[in-house]
Every structure is written in C-alpha cells, then in structure tokens.
Image (cartoon, grey):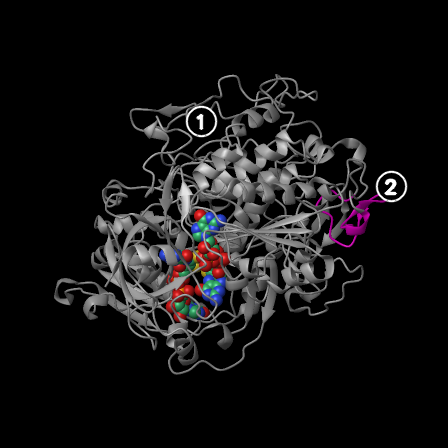
Amino acid sequence: MTNHWVDIRNADVILVMGGDSAEAHPCGFKWVTEAKAHRGAKLIVVDPRFNRTASVADFYAPIRTGTDIAFLGGVINYLLTHDTIQHEYVKNYTDFTFLVREDFAFNDGIYSGFDTKNSKYTDKTSWNYELGDDGFVKTDATLQNPRCVYNLMKQHYSRYTPEMVEKVCGTPKDKFLKVCEMLATCAAPNRACTILYALGWTQHSIGSQMIRCGAMVQLLLGNIGVAGGGMNALRGHSNIQGLTDLGLMSNLLTGYMTLPNEGEQDFDGYIKQRASQPLRPNQLSYWRNYKAFFVSMMKSWYGDAASADNNWGYDYLPKLDKPYDMLQIYELMVQGKVNGYLAQGFNPLASAPNKAKMTAALSKLKWLVIMDPLATETSEFWKNYGEYNDVDSSQIQTEVFRLPTTCFAEERGSLVSSSRVLQWHWQGVLPPGDARSDLEIMSGIFLRMRAMYQKDGGKYPEPLLKLSWPYAHPGSPTPEEIAMEFNGKALADVTDPKDSTKVLAKAGEQLPGFAMLRDDGSTSSGCWIFCGAWTQAGNQMGRRDNADPTGIGQSLNWAWAWPANRRVLYNRASCDPNGKPFDPSRKLIAWNGNAWSGPDVPDFKLDENPDGGMGPFIMNPEGVARFFARDMMNEGPFPEHYEPFETPLGYNPFHPQNPLATNNPGARVFPDDRAAFGKVSAFPHVATTYRITEHFHFWTKHARLNAIIQPQQFVEIGEDLAKEVGVVAGDRVRVSSNRGHIVAVAVVTKRIKPLMVDGKKIQTVGIPLHWGFKGLARPGYLTNTLTPFVGDANTQTPEFKSFLVKVEKA
Ligand SMILES: Nc1nc2c(c(=O)[nH]1)N[C@H]1C(S)=C(S)[C@@H](COP(=O)(O)OP(=O)(O)OC[C@H]3O[C@@H](n4cnc5c(=O)[nH]c(N)nc54)[C@H](O)[C@@H]3O)O[C@H]1N2
Ligand SMILES: Nc1nc2c(c(=O)[nH]1)N[C@H]1C(S)=C(S)[C@@H](COP(=O)(O)OP(=O)(O)OC[C@H]3O[C@@H](n4cnc5c(=O)[nH]c(N)nc54)[C@H](O)[C@@H]3O)O[C@H]1N2
Ligand SMILES: [Mo]
C-alpha cells in the first residue's frame, strides 16, 4: 500500500476493483465502513461478480474478466477530455511536460522495437524520453509539443471511448460513465479517492499494466501521496509483504535491490546501472545511495569476508541467466533439469496452474522436501486418491521428505502487513510433537551443508563457507538476533559527512535509520528499508501506542513502518509546490519556512526549500511520477488492452486485424503451454477463481469448524447459464478446460449475469479455490486442474483470473 489501512477512513471515494476486500480482508474492510459511516464516502465496486464488497457498495458496475485496462483507459480518456484532472499536481509532479523520443511509435497494438518474425520486443531503446546534451530530459511547459507525454497519452487513450468500453468490457455505457463521474469529483484538491485492489488485477497476463493504469488514474486526480488516496495493494498471507521486502523472489535482493544478471560480472557497472543519476535538474534520485545499501547488506551477510578488495563479496552472488519465477522453475522440472525442490510453507500442487503439468514436474524430481505443519496435496502428490489424484505411484521415483514446522501462533517475531507496518508478535502456544521452527530447520540444513563443503570441498564453496553466522546458538538463531541484523549496526564509528569529528553512531551500536548507511564497509544492514526497526532504543516493532494526536490516522508510535516509520508514501505530493497542504483538513506534512514536518514522517529531504523545485517522487531519477513508463515495463510504456490468452472473442476488439496484438506480446508463455490453451468453440464459458472468507487457501480445510462451514467444492453460475445448460441449484456439474476437469456442486445465483461483449453473450463461471484431497472437508478436485500455465510479462504471476471452461451437468 502507498497508504495504510487506517487511512482508508480519510477517503471520499473508494474504488474496489480487482479485489473483494469485504471477503478477503474482512478486518481491514472496517476502515471502508468507517469512511462510509463518518465521512459519507462513496464505495464503488467494479467486478465480474456482484460480490460481498458489492453488496455494501453505493455503486456496482459489472466487467468482463481481464478487460480492466479497457475500462481504466476509458476513465483516463474521460478525465482528459472533460479536463477533470488536478492541474497543479499533474503539471508539477508528473512527466506530463516531458518529451518522448522521435522514434517511439505505436501501430495497431504494437510498440516500436518489435521483431515481427519472432513475435517479441527485441529493442526497447525508443521507449524513452528525449534527452538534451546536458543529460536532462527535454520538456515543454506549454504542453503544445505533440511529442510530450500529455499529448501522446491523450492520443493513445482517445480510442478508449465509452462505446469501446462497453464493447470490450461488457459494462453498460451508462454504468461506466457513472463511475467516471464519481471518480472525477476527486480531481478537486479537497477530495480524495483511494483504490483498493489485489488479485483481480495481478493474476492476468497483463496484470502489472492494469495496476499501472489504476495508478495513472490516481495521478490524474492528484490522489497519490495524499491522505485518503493512494494505490493500495491489499496483500495476501500475513507476511507476504515481508517476503518481497526481504527479497525472497528469484530476481530480488533485500529492500528491492536486484540481483545482477549474467552480463553484469563487473561490480562498478552493476552499481552504476542501479544508482541512477537525476534526469532533471535539482532532483534527489534517492537510489543514488544504492551502493551504501548494497555494501551494508553484503557486510551483514558476509562480515569480514566482504571487503573493498573483493568488491564486498560481489562474486559470491549468483548472476541470473533468466528470471527463476515459479512458472520457469516448473517448466525446467518438466524438462528434467531440476534435481531437488524445497517447498517451505507452499502447496504448489494446489496453488500453481495446470495440475497435470505440476504432477509431471514434481514426478521428475529426485527429491522433494516439504516444510509444513500439515500434510498437503503437494507432499502426497505421488499417492493415488482416486478420481481426485489419479496417479500411478509405481511410476513416480521422487523421494519425499516431510519436515513438520511450527506455525505463526507457535512462534514469535515480526510480520509485515499490507500497510508496510512491521509488527512484533509473541508466541501463544508451544508447538506440538516434533515440530520445529522454520529458523531452526533452515539453520540445521545450512550447518550440515557447510560441514559437507568443509569436509569434501566442491565447486566454488566460498559463498557458503564465508557466510557470517554470528548467533549465540548457531543451530537456532533467535528472531531477536535476526531482527537486529536486518536493522543493522555501526561496524566502526559513523561520522557526519559534513563534520568528521561529529560521531553519529558509535561502533557496535544499532543504527537509527538508513540515512546512516555507508558504502565503505563501516555499517551493516541486512535490509536497508527495515533500518530503524530495532534501534539503540530497542524493538520499535513491539510498540503499542495507538495515540493519533491529529485525528488523521497517523499513529506513529504503533509498531514501525518502512521506510523510516513513514505511513503515507510520497507525502510531499500532498502539498502544493510552495509546501502548503492542498487540503489543510487532511494535512500530512507541510513546509514551515525552515523544515518539513507534520503528523507523518516527511517523504522528502527535511530541510529542502520548496524554491529548489525538487520533485516529490524522490526515488525516481525524474523526481516526478511517470505516465510514460519508459523501458521499465516489458510490454510497453502505456498500458494497452490485450485479451486473456484464453479469450472468448479470439481477437482484440482494439486491433481486430492484427493477430500479433490479440494477447500481451511480452507475456510469460512456453510452447507446450500454448498448445494446451483451449478455444472458445470447445470451451464457451469464461471462468475466474477466487477465495471465500470461510477458508484460508488450502489449510483451513484441515480445521473442523471451517470444514463444517464450507464443506465442499462449489462453483457459482448465473441463472441464465444454469438454464442454458439445464442445471438447478445443488446439481453436480462438470467443469472442464483444455487441461482437465473438476466436478462440484452448482450454486445458481443472481449475482453473476451474462454480459454482452461485441455483440456476443459472455457467461462467467466463478470457482472458489479452497478444496482438495487432504484435510477434513469433503475430498474433491483441485481448482487448479483447470487453469492455464501463462503469466504476466513483468511479474510472471499466473493468469488465474480469466480462462475458458465448459460447464455441463455431471
Ligand atoms: N478468508 C480468506 N482471506 C484471504 C485469503 C484466503 O484464502 N481466505 N487469501 C489471502 C491472499 S493470499 C490474497 S493474495 C488475498 C486476495 O484478495 P482478493 O484479490 O481480494 O481475492 P480474490 O478472491 O482472489 O478475488 C478478487 C476478486 O477479483 C474479481 N475478479 C476476477 N477477475 C477479475 C477481473 O478481471 N477484473 C476485476 N475487476 N475483478 C476480477 C473476483 O470476482 C473477486 O471478487 O486474500 C487474502 N485473504
Ligand atoms: N486458481 C487460483 N490459484 C491461486 C490463486 C487464485 O486466486 N486462483 N491465488 C494464488 C495466491 S495469491 C496464493 S498466495 C497462493 C497460495 O498458495 P500456497 O501458499 O501454496 O497455499 P497455502 O495453502 O496458503 O499454503 C501455505 C502452507 O504453509 C503452511 N504454513 C503455515 N504456517 C507455516 C509456517 O510457519 N511455516 C511453514 N513452513 N509453513 C507454514 C500451511 O500449512 C500451508 O500448507 O495460491 C495461488 N493460487
Ligand atoms: Mo496471495
């Protein structure tokens, strides 16, 4: 979230699109209720289903799955043509005035740099601004130049008319326009809209661009950085925010630093590439400090073995030849290129797409280790469960080890919430039986591996042998030790760069914040954005003072938020260029003549006078927010609508004559999976998958009460479709895709209606995902038997939210 849970109550308009927060985030949803009750906020829901959130909304608009860019592009077009944008904000805080290179082009759905023969982008150099001789971007403050971002964007979205929105999304034009009108009220500086989203946007082959498109709407309305505004990703598992913060993705290091790729063998080149220099005069470009963050991380990992002489252990890091996202890994498994797999708190047979492919993948392993408190579908993928898991065990040689772990209530430590708040929690009960904590198991594996390398040697053992392991009990580090390590400490006295006699932190002390990190090896910090969580004053994550002195929801003494205990990111943008809040009643920070201060921690240089013209988006080298994403996105600088890979139309209504532009040209897709896509002629219904409040993924079916409340797999179909296929409520239906089938109970509902899309009637089928063949609920099929193996072009997140099926009476 750019903002935070409590802040939702400051909103005037709340758009829930691409998520069902009442269902999936019922506790956090109370802040939506508060905004409605105490502020008269209006709640809008745009969803293929009239879901639980819609049931308490002020306005609901239906949409066909996978078409949110068409809808949001339509909103952008509406805001630009009606000129309902926050002018002062956009002009000063975005790239509106920036000029784009002459060779940048967009033709019938495809950007410049496309290799038509191989159907992919091979040259993204034209996706950039026009730079002057001084290295700065050229601008046109008058917005007359046809190559400025404003004009290119206006032209790009001029095709997204209300008629096109209706044609592509199936959203009736009057409903679409009503949403536009409600959003447009928030262009006023004294009104704010927040967008809450989750998987309904991320789980598409064009998901990242849906989210960008939402952010573009928010920028036009001047709603980023302000109280009650923002782009708010409501996250999943309790610590999934912490997972990405700590770099547990194949291409990440901690704090959103990135692993080097194969071509980056040279350390200085690696740093230079990431420590971006400002693209406009007087801009901060905070990533210029990349080296300090990186060196501090390497000191924390490798201690004395990371020194200036060996480039801080740069050679110890793997260099990526490609991203190892989950689709890539399972594809490699199927190809027989992976020997072993460690699934920690993960049930991929149930949660990854295309169960048949997953079974083939896991069957090719020599060994599989499961770290989980429960016996899961994955740990028993090799066992025959009749129709639900029809495998021939004698043909599977994979050796499976199950290591029972504790779960959250049986341990203590920190969890990061969607609000970026690191909150300490304490152990509630002792673990049962042989269960051990993940920390203990991981440490045990590491120590044994290290001993084997010490004894037997091996190819390049240094990255393992040199790892620093400074814990009191090496086999069982404490959560406190780990937390102090990710915060970081001074390894030598840290002095003021302007006055070397002034000591800011003495050697050995915990550091107060990342501004004190150095690139000379005198500091360590396992995760720079977490620096400040455990200072000399102790564990900041354990704080529980919910005082909110100004009533704006800024409880700065409740736990601790990254970065720097700041609760609203980009909050400098809540003030006008002179430093006065756009809306004094919603003040987050202000310039007092000498410094920035306010109820929130300023997201800016504290003593930076507004006269200097420094932009509020200090992480960007431009200093402003981008409508034009340059070459950062893999399918182009402006979001464009592409059809889901299993499209019910078979063409892209924006580019009916260009088959190359039917689907996202940058998406993650392997040849065999392309062959496994189904066609609308055989699978005429559009399916989407989701969760329900009564279960948490695949684990609560092991808990008796949850298993009683929601005992078995069901699918939701509208009354119209039920009639069409001759099914009544309670019948068992067979739902098949080109990859397999499931059988489930039919729930016939008024909450899903057919949509008219380009003259064609589209039926949507809703499939909750929680059941399987393990646990106390009634044994059944895994939903992911049906889903296609294709992912987003940037995150590689699978397209779980839009694919083709056929529903029949079983
Ligand atoms: N009780 C409970 N709570 C949970 C979880 C759980 O398993 N149980 N899981 C947690 C996890 S890990 C996560 S990631 C979050 C997920 O939180 P959400 O994303 O809110 O949950 P989902 O149920 O996946 O579905 C979201 C909504 O997206 C809609 N949708 C589908 N396709 C589209 C589309 O193309 N466009 C639009 N606009 N909407 C679409 C669906 O109809 C559904 O209403 O929930 C978390 N909370
Ligand atoms: N079709 C479809 N598929 C989906 C989705 C969808 O919307 N549609 N959503 C996707 C999303 S957003 C997610 S997050 C995934 C979820 O996919 P998974 O993460 O694979 O599903 P979970 O059932 O949450 O599995 C987590 C496991 O962790 C175990 N566990 C709990 N606590 C601990 C602990 O402290 N330590 C260890 N080691 N294990 C623990 C639980 O027992 C459980 O078995 O599913 C994805 N798959
Ligand atoms: Mo999730």
Q: Residue at x 29, y 53 (%)?
A: 458
What kind of residue is marked 1?
Lys
Q: Secondary structure at mark 2?
A: loop
Q: Along the horizontal axis of the image, is 86 left or right of 648?
A: right
Q: Position of residue 741 (x, y in %)?
A: 24, 58
Q: Residue at x 78, y 60 (%)?
A: 551
Q: Nearer the viewer, residue 808 or 590?
A: 808
Sequence order check: which comes first, mark 2 or mark 1?
Answer: 1
Query: Magenta span: helix, strand or loop, mainly?
Result: loop
Q: Along the horizontal axis of the image, is 334 left or right of 159?
A: left
Asked whether 599 falls inside the magenta stretch, the response is yes
Q: Along the horizontal axis of the image, is 712 left or right of 268?
A: left
Q: Is residue 84 above or below residue 718?
A: above
The C terminus sits in image quarter: bottom left
Q: Which residues are magenta?
A: 584-606
Q: Residue at x 55, y 61 (%)?
A: 55
Q: Along the horizontal axis of the image, is 386 left or right of 433?
A: left
Q: Secondary structure at mark 1?
A: loop
Asked whether 774 falls inside the magenta stretch, the response is no
Q: Position of residue 97 (x, y in %)?
A: 65, 25
Report if residue 420 is visible in the image: yes
Return the residue at label 2: 593
Pointer 2 and pointer 1: residues touching (CB < 8 Å)? no
- The residue sitting at the right extreme is 593
Query: Where is residue 550, by image quadrant?
Result: bottom right
- Separation (CA) of disc 2 from disc 1: 44 Å
Q: Position of residue 425 (x, y in %)?
A: 58, 71
Query: Where is residue 148, by image quadrant?
Result: top right
Q: Residue at x 63, y 48 (%)?
A: 230
What kind of residue is marked 2?
Gly
Return the residue at label 1: 124
Q: Position of residue 515 (x, y in %)?
A: 68, 48
